[in-house]
Amino acid sequence: MKNELTYMDKVYKWGRNWNISVMLILLAFPIAVAIIFDAAPDWNGLLMGLVATAPMYWAVGVVETITYIPMLGAGGSYLSFVTGNISNLKLPCALNALEQANVKANSEEGEIVSTISIAVSSIVTTLIIILGVILIVPLTPVLENPVLDPAFAQMIPALFGGLGVVFVSRNWKLAIAPVTLMLILFIAVPALNSGTVGIMVPVSVIFTLIISRIMYKKGWL
Amino acid sequence: MTFDVNHPIIFAMVAVVIAVVLAQSVFFLVKAWKRGIEIGMDKKKLRKIAVTATVFTIAPAVAIVISVIALSKQLGLALPWLRLSVVGSLSYEAIAAENTANAMGLGATEIPNASQFVTVVLVMTLSIMVGIWLVPAICKKMQSGMINLEKRDKKWADIFNSAMFIGMIAAFVGFVFCDVGNVVSGDFTGLIPVCVMFVSAVIMAVCGLLAGKFKNIHWIADYALPLSLILGMASAIPITAWLS
């Protein structure tokens, strides 16, 4: 008798099929543009552009994927890595939903909650961008208004202030060492800024895991 | 066919890709929702999760629209629409586009021909694609590892999860303080993100206290994060005027 697939097995199957399909469609886009407009890529520009961009993004991409999968859950990971904006939108959204529903990330309820919040967030984002593209002419002067500029420039601090107070207050023993280390590094090293914060996330996560393990073994948690 | 970065055909192709990605989100939403009901999760709870996610997403999504507008000055409207709806974020896409444009000697001007447009799209696509194929390759193994960890030592598995979230939040808290050092040279703008984060944290804490104290306004806890996000962002306007 054929074994029935569990929900999680199905999620892995759906995720694999969807992600590979999206990857192929994304690759087909530049090829289609090249065929329709009868234009080959500028090979030298392509090589130089890739050399300047790809190695760093591939390395960061691998580390980010490994770091974010346990936090996002399976369904959430498949969706987030297709729709992007993970650390500034999808992950905080999932964290908030897990917190609100009072479920653990590594339970089946957690998987459901995380997937629903990320799917809804992705749909809403896509629809708002579509609306923005349609209304770009009247919206541009409003959204680029210098009065509103500071508000959008400070989205990350506003997001992590709210999120931080919940998680840090609940896990303050775990938070002391990584928050202290990150404060020292970001204040002391000028190269650490908005462009490099993505690289520092895995560093901070690994450091926190090591410290937590030591604290756990010593019975401090 | 004469090329233009805003050619209707390019828009049509982008719309198709975005429709597929939208379909994936709807597919996973429906499947997760059905499974939630199947395992006995309350419909009201699921609806609340969806509503809160919607409210929370609005401000960051508007910020993404601003990024689309920013990138459209060089790349036209269709390509940023695609790249910021799928996979990327402003910082990644802008750097990939800039590196390629510089390699072709274009600078910050609008991309003039199809060949250069295709080149920029290829660099963006090939550079920022790791997650899409790597997740299917390793997700099952990693999630199984997490389940085994839970079976072996439940307490450590819970700490492990919390530690990952704390690690991520710690990195962003550090980032908020990255320009504080400029204060010694008389530049106080580095304090703007710190003050905004403080305002947002206070609003979140007040919401939590109010929801705990007054049961009739418990709903405030559900919207505490979007509220702290929006009010925190709004506070940036006077704080920036004050510290700049």
Image (tube, coloured by chain):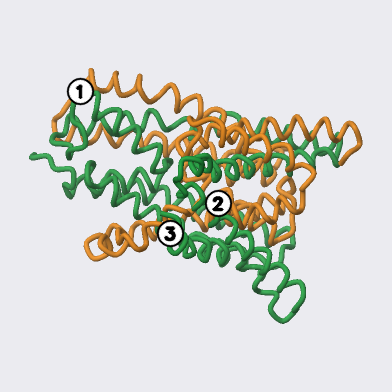
Give SS at disc 1.
loop
**Placement of the C terminus of chain A among the 4 image quadrants:** top right
| Tag 2: amino acid | Val
Closer to us: mark 3 or mark 2? 2
At x 41% / y 35%, what residue is drawn?
A23
According to the image, label 3 marks what residue? Answer: A151
Q: Quadrant of the N terminus of chain A?
A: top right
Amino acid on which the number 3 mark rests in the picture: Ala
In green, which chain?
B
Please tell me whether mark 3 sits on a helix, a strand or a loop.
helix
Q: Taking A107 as reference, is A17 above or below it?
A: above
* Crowd class of label 2 (few under 14; some 14 to 19; many from 20; radius 10 Å): many
Tell me, yes or no, whether dots 1 and 2 are on the same chain: no
- Determine the chain carrying the residue at label 3: A
- SS class, disc 2: helix
* Dot placed on the residue nearer the N-terminal end, 3 or 1: 1
Say which quarter of the image contains residue B124.
top left
Residue B238, x across and y down, in percent: 44, 64
Q: Quadrant of residue B195?
A: bottom right
Q: Which chain is orange?
A: A
Check disc 2 and report the residue beneath it: B194
Q: Is residue A47 visible?
A: yes
| Left or right: B128, with B195 as reference point | left
Q: Chain of mark 2?
A: B
Q: Please say if B51 is above or below B165.
A: below
Distance in Å between CA atoms under marks 3 and 1: 39 Å
Of residues B241 and B199, the one nearer the viewer is B241
The residue beneath circle 1 is A42
Residue at far bottom of view: B216
